[in-house]
Image (cartoon, grey):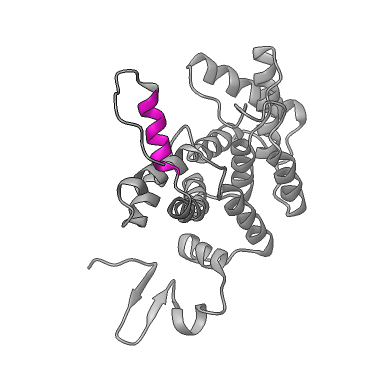
Amino acid sequence: MIKTEIGYTTVDSIVVRGRNLAEEVLGKLDFVDMLMLVTAARMPSPAEKAMLNVLLVAACDHGLTPSALSARLTFLGAPEALQGAVAAGLLGAGSVFLGTTQNAAEMLVGAAKPLPAQASDDEVHAAARSLVNAMRAERRPIYGVGHNIHVNGDPRVPVLRELSRANGFYGVHWRLMEAVTAELGAALGKTLPMNAVGATAAIVADMGIDPLLSRGLMMVGRCAGLVGHLLEERSAPTGMELWDLVLDQDPRNSRPARKK
Protein backbone atom coordinates (compact mmCIF):
# COMPACT_ATOMS: atom_id res chain seq x y z
CA MET A 1 0.00 0.00 0.00
CA ILE A 2 1.29 3.44 -0.95
CA LYS A 3 0.44 6.06 1.65
CA THR A 4 1.75 9.07 3.57
CA GLU A 5 1.44 9.88 7.24
CA ILE A 6 1.02 13.56 6.39
CA GLY A 7 -2.56 13.33 5.23
CA TYR A 8 -5.31 11.78 3.15
CA THR A 9 -8.63 12.63 1.54
CA THR A 10 -12.00 10.89 1.68
CA VAL A 11 -15.30 11.69 0.01
CA ASP A 12 -16.32 13.81 3.00
CA SER A 13 -13.09 15.08 4.56
CA ILE A 14 -9.45 16.07 4.28
CA VAL A 15 -7.17 14.96 7.11
CA VAL A 16 -3.72 16.44 7.83
CA ARG A 17 -1.59 14.77 10.51
CA GLY A 18 -4.71 13.28 12.04
CA ARG A 19 -6.64 16.57 12.13
CA ASN A 20 -9.74 17.29 10.11
CA LEU A 21 -8.74 20.21 7.89
CA ALA A 22 -12.20 21.79 7.76
CA GLU A 23 -13.13 21.28 11.40
CA GLU A 24 -9.84 21.42 13.34
CA VAL A 25 -7.43 23.43 11.22
CA LEU A 26 -9.06 26.13 9.12
CA GLY A 27 -9.59 29.25 11.21
CA LYS A 28 -7.80 27.68 14.16
CA LEU A 29 -4.16 27.28 13.07
CA ASP A 30 -2.01 29.92 11.40
CA PHE A 31 0.62 29.28 8.74
CA VAL A 32 3.53 28.64 11.11
CA ASP A 33 1.38 26.23 13.13
CA MET A 34 0.53 24.39 9.91
CA LEU A 35 4.12 24.41 8.75
CA MET A 36 5.27 22.67 11.92
CA LEU A 37 2.31 20.30 11.90
CA VAL A 38 3.10 19.16 8.36
CA THR A 39 6.89 18.97 8.70
CA ALA A 40 7.36 17.93 12.33
CA ALA A 41 3.97 16.34 13.15
CA ARG A 42 3.51 18.62 16.15
CA MET A 43 2.57 22.14 17.12
CA PRO A 44 5.31 24.68 17.87
CA SER A 45 5.83 26.13 21.32
CA PRO A 46 5.25 29.91 21.60
CA ALA A 47 9.03 30.49 21.56
CA GLU A 48 9.53 28.23 18.54
CA LYS A 49 6.69 29.95 16.74
CA ALA A 50 8.20 33.36 17.37
CA MET A 51 11.60 32.31 16.01
CA LEU A 52 10.16 30.51 13.00
CA ASN A 53 8.26 33.67 12.11
CA VAL A 54 11.50 35.63 12.38
CA LEU A 55 13.35 33.21 10.10
CA LEU A 56 10.60 33.23 7.47
CA VAL A 57 10.46 37.03 7.48
CA ALA A 58 14.24 37.34 7.26
CA ALA A 59 14.36 35.03 4.25
CA CYS A 60 11.57 36.77 2.33
CA ASP A 61 13.51 39.25 0.23
CA HIS A 62 16.94 40.83 -0.18
CA GLY A 63 16.35 42.84 -3.36
CA LEU A 64 17.68 41.84 -6.76
CA THR A 65 19.42 38.67 -5.64
CA PRO A 66 20.24 35.79 -8.03
CA SER A 67 16.94 34.10 -7.13
CA ALA A 68 14.95 37.25 -7.94
CA LEU A 69 16.87 37.78 -11.18
CA SER A 70 16.25 34.17 -12.24
CA ALA A 71 12.55 34.53 -11.53
CA ARG A 72 12.23 37.83 -13.39
CA LEU A 73 14.09 36.58 -16.46
CA THR A 74 11.99 33.42 -16.58
CA PHE A 75 8.86 35.52 -16.30
CA LEU A 76 10.11 37.58 -19.25
CA GLY A 77 10.06 34.46 -21.41
CA ALA A 78 6.94 32.87 -19.91
CA PRO A 79 4.67 35.51 -18.37
CA GLU A 80 1.80 33.02 -18.41
CA ALA A 81 3.64 30.74 -15.93
CA LEU A 82 4.03 32.40 -12.56
CA GLN A 83 4.79 29.01 -11.05
CA GLY A 84 7.66 28.44 -13.49
CA ALA A 85 9.25 31.78 -12.65
CA VAL A 86 8.97 31.16 -8.89
CA ALA A 87 10.42 27.68 -9.38
CA ALA A 88 13.33 29.13 -11.35
CA GLY A 89 14.13 31.43 -8.45
CA LEU A 90 13.97 28.61 -5.92
CA LEU A 91 16.13 26.26 -7.98
CA GLY A 92 19.14 28.41 -7.16
CA ALA A 93 18.84 27.75 -3.42
CA GLY A 94 22.16 25.94 -3.24
CA SER A 95 25.51 25.95 -1.49
CA VAL A 96 26.32 29.56 -2.40
CA PHE A 97 22.99 31.41 -2.06
CA LEU A 98 19.98 30.81 0.19
CA GLY A 99 20.63 27.09 0.76
CA THR A 100 23.76 27.80 2.75
CA THR A 101 21.78 27.85 5.98
CA GLN A 102 21.57 24.06 5.82
CA ASN A 103 25.31 23.76 5.20
CA ALA A 104 26.12 26.12 8.07
CA ALA A 105 23.74 24.37 10.45
CA GLU A 106 25.25 20.98 9.60
CA MET A 107 28.71 22.46 10.18
CA LEU A 108 27.73 23.75 13.63
CA VAL A 109 25.87 20.61 14.70
CA GLY A 110 28.82 18.42 13.76
CA ALA A 111 31.44 20.62 15.45
CA ALA A 112 29.36 21.01 18.63
CA LYS A 113 28.77 17.28 19.23
CA PRO A 114 31.68 16.92 21.70
CA LEU A 115 30.69 20.07 23.58
CA PRO A 116 28.51 20.00 26.69
CA ALA A 117 25.56 22.38 26.75
CA GLN A 118 27.36 24.55 29.32
CA ALA A 119 30.79 24.39 27.66
CA SER A 120 33.35 26.94 28.81
CA ASP A 121 34.53 29.69 26.50
CA ASP A 122 37.88 27.91 26.18
CA GLU A 123 36.16 24.69 25.10
CA VAL A 124 34.00 26.51 22.55
CA HIS A 125 36.95 28.37 21.07
CA ALA A 126 39.02 25.19 20.94
CA ALA A 127 36.23 23.48 18.98
CA ALA A 128 35.94 26.50 16.68
CA ARG A 129 39.71 26.58 16.11
CA SER A 130 39.74 22.89 15.28
CA LEU A 131 36.87 23.36 12.83
CA VAL A 132 38.48 26.35 11.12
CA ASN A 133 41.85 24.61 10.81
CA ALA A 134 40.32 21.41 9.44
CA MET A 135 38.13 23.14 6.88
CA ARG A 136 40.92 25.41 5.72
CA ALA A 137 43.27 22.44 5.36
CA GLU A 138 40.64 20.67 3.25
CA ARG A 139 39.90 23.87 1.28
CA ARG A 140 36.26 23.66 2.26
CA PRO A 141 34.10 26.77 2.68
CA ILE A 142 33.46 28.02 6.19
CA TYR A 143 29.83 29.09 6.20
CA GLY A 144 28.29 32.00 8.03
CA VAL A 145 31.24 34.39 8.01
CA GLY A 146 31.90 37.44 5.85
CA HIS A 147 29.67 39.52 3.59
CA ASN A 148 30.32 41.19 0.25
CA ILE A 149 28.15 44.20 1.14
CA HIS A 150 27.89 44.39 4.93
CA VAL A 151 31.64 44.48 5.44
CA ASN A 152 31.33 46.33 8.76
CA GLY A 153 28.73 43.96 10.17
CA ASP A 154 25.49 42.38 8.99
CA PRO A 155 22.66 44.49 10.50
CA ARG A 156 20.47 41.40 10.87
CA VAL A 157 22.82 39.54 13.19
CA PRO A 158 22.42 41.65 16.38
CA VAL A 159 18.63 41.51 16.03
CA LEU A 160 18.64 37.76 15.48
CA ARG A 161 20.95 37.31 18.48
CA GLU A 162 18.71 39.37 20.73
CA LEU A 163 15.57 37.55 19.61
CA SER A 164 17.32 34.22 20.18
CA ARG A 165 18.18 35.27 23.73
CA ALA A 166 14.64 36.49 24.36
CA ASN A 167 13.13 33.20 23.22
CA GLY A 168 15.62 30.89 24.90
CA PHE A 169 17.51 29.74 21.82
CA TYR A 170 20.92 31.25 22.47
CA GLY A 171 23.01 28.19 23.24
CA VAL A 172 26.22 26.39 22.44
CA HIS A 173 25.72 26.62 18.67
CA TRP A 174 25.36 30.40 18.79
CA ARG A 175 28.49 30.59 20.92
CA LEU A 176 30.32 28.27 18.54
CA MET A 177 29.34 30.37 15.51
CA GLU A 178 30.63 33.50 17.22
CA ALA A 179 33.86 31.68 18.06
CA VAL A 180 34.23 30.44 14.47
CA THR A 181 33.93 34.04 13.29
CA ALA A 182 36.64 35.16 15.72
CA GLU A 183 38.97 32.21 15.03
CA LEU A 184 38.72 32.54 11.25
CA GLY A 185 39.38 36.27 11.50
CA ALA A 186 42.43 35.61 13.66
CA ALA A 187 43.73 32.98 11.23
CA LEU A 188 43.36 35.36 8.31
CA GLY A 189 44.59 38.40 10.19
CA LYS A 190 41.49 40.50 9.58
CA THR A 191 38.09 41.21 11.05
CA LEU A 192 35.23 39.30 9.48
CA PRO A 193 31.55 39.79 10.37
CA MET A 194 29.15 36.98 11.04
CA ASN A 195 26.43 37.06 8.40
CA ALA A 196 22.73 36.20 8.55
CA VAL A 197 23.44 32.67 7.33
CA GLY A 198 25.62 32.05 10.37
CA ALA A 199 23.07 33.56 12.73
CA THR A 200 20.19 31.62 11.19
CA ALA A 201 22.17 28.39 11.29
CA ALA A 202 22.94 28.98 14.97
CA ILE A 203 19.25 29.54 15.67
CA VAL A 204 18.26 26.41 13.79
CA ALA A 205 20.89 24.31 15.56
CA ASP A 206 19.99 25.66 19.01
CA MET A 207 16.31 24.99 18.29
CA GLY A 208 17.12 21.39 17.39
CA ILE A 209 15.61 21.75 13.92
CA ASP A 210 16.75 19.36 11.18
CA PRO A 211 19.23 21.32 9.02
CA LEU A 212 17.40 20.11 5.92
CA LEU A 213 14.24 21.78 7.20
CA SER A 214 16.21 25.00 7.57
CA ARG A 215 16.78 25.04 3.81
CA GLY A 216 13.06 24.46 3.39
CA LEU A 217 12.26 27.40 5.67
CA MET A 218 14.49 29.65 3.58
CA MET A 219 12.70 28.57 0.41
CA VAL A 220 9.24 29.01 1.93
CA GLY A 221 10.14 32.53 3.03
CA ARG A 222 11.79 33.43 -0.28
CA CYS A 223 8.81 32.12 -2.25
CA ALA A 224 6.71 35.02 -0.97
CA GLY A 225 9.41 37.49 -1.95
CA LEU A 226 9.64 36.02 -5.45
CA VAL A 227 5.90 36.38 -5.94
CA GLY A 228 6.31 40.04 -4.99
CA HIS A 229 9.09 40.47 -7.53
CA LEU A 230 6.96 38.92 -10.27
CA LEU A 231 3.96 41.10 -9.49
CA GLU A 232 6.29 44.09 -9.77
CA GLU A 233 7.80 42.67 -12.96
CA ARG A 234 4.37 42.70 -14.55
CA SER A 235 3.77 46.37 -13.74
CA ALA A 236 7.35 47.69 -13.81
CA PRO A 237 9.38 45.22 -15.89
CA THR A 238 13.15 44.97 -15.60
CA GLY A 239 13.72 41.62 -17.33
CA MET A 240 14.08 43.13 -20.80
CA GLU A 241 16.44 45.77 -19.44
CA LEU A 242 18.59 43.04 -17.93
CA TRP A 243 18.72 41.25 -21.27
CA ASP A 244 19.52 44.49 -23.06
CA LEU A 245 22.32 45.13 -20.56
CA VAL A 246 23.91 41.78 -21.40
CA LEU A 247 23.60 42.39 -25.14
CA ASP A 248 25.10 45.86 -24.81
CA GLN A 249 28.14 44.47 -22.97
CA ASP A 250 29.14 42.25 -25.92
CA PRO A 251 30.64 44.30 -28.80
CA ARG A 252 29.83 41.49 -31.23
CA ASN A 253 26.13 42.21 -30.93
CA SER A 254 24.67 44.55 -33.51
CA ARG A 255 21.00 45.45 -33.35
CA PRO A 256 18.74 48.43 -33.89
CA ALA A 257 17.96 50.58 -30.87
CA ARG A 258 14.85 49.46 -29.03
CA LYS A 259 11.98 51.90 -29.03
CA LYS A 260 11.12 53.13 -25.56
Residue positioned 45% across, 50% down in the render: 233
Residue 108 visible from this viewpoint: yes
Of helix, strand and loop, which mostly describes the magenta segment?
helix
Q: Is residue 53 above or below residue 152?
A: below
Image quadrant containing the C terminus: top left
Residue 92 visible from this viewpoint: no
Residue 244 magenta: yes
Q: Nearer the viewer, residue 219 or 207?
A: 219
Q: Indicate left or right for 32 with 118 as reference.
A: left
Q: Is residue 22 above or below residue 239?
A: below
Residue 243 magenta: yes
Q: Residue furthest top?
A: 189
Residue 188 horizontal/vertical position (percent): 65, 13
Which stretch appears magenta? 238-248
Q: Nearer the viewer, residue 176 or 250?
A: 250
Residue 240 horizontal/vertical position (percent): 39, 40
Q: Indicate left or right for 178 with 95 as reference.
A: right
Classify residue 117 by image quadrant: top right
Q: Is residue 184 above or below residue 243?
A: above
Classify residue 148 by image quadrant: top right
Classify residue 16 by image quadrant: bottom left
Q: Is residue 235 above or below residue 239?
A: below
Residue positioned 38% across, 28% down in the render: 246
Residue 214 horizontal/vertical position (percent): 52, 47
Q: Exactly how many numbered labels are in the figure? A: 0
Residue 138 horizontal/vertical position (percent): 48, 17
Q: Nearer the viewer, residue 260 or 97?
A: 260
Residue positioned 64% across, 58% down in the render: 48
Q: Nearer the viewer, residue 63 or 88?
A: 63
Q: Indicate left or right for 208 with 176 as reference.
A: left
Image quadrant containing the N terminus: bottom left
Q: Residue furthest left?
A: 1
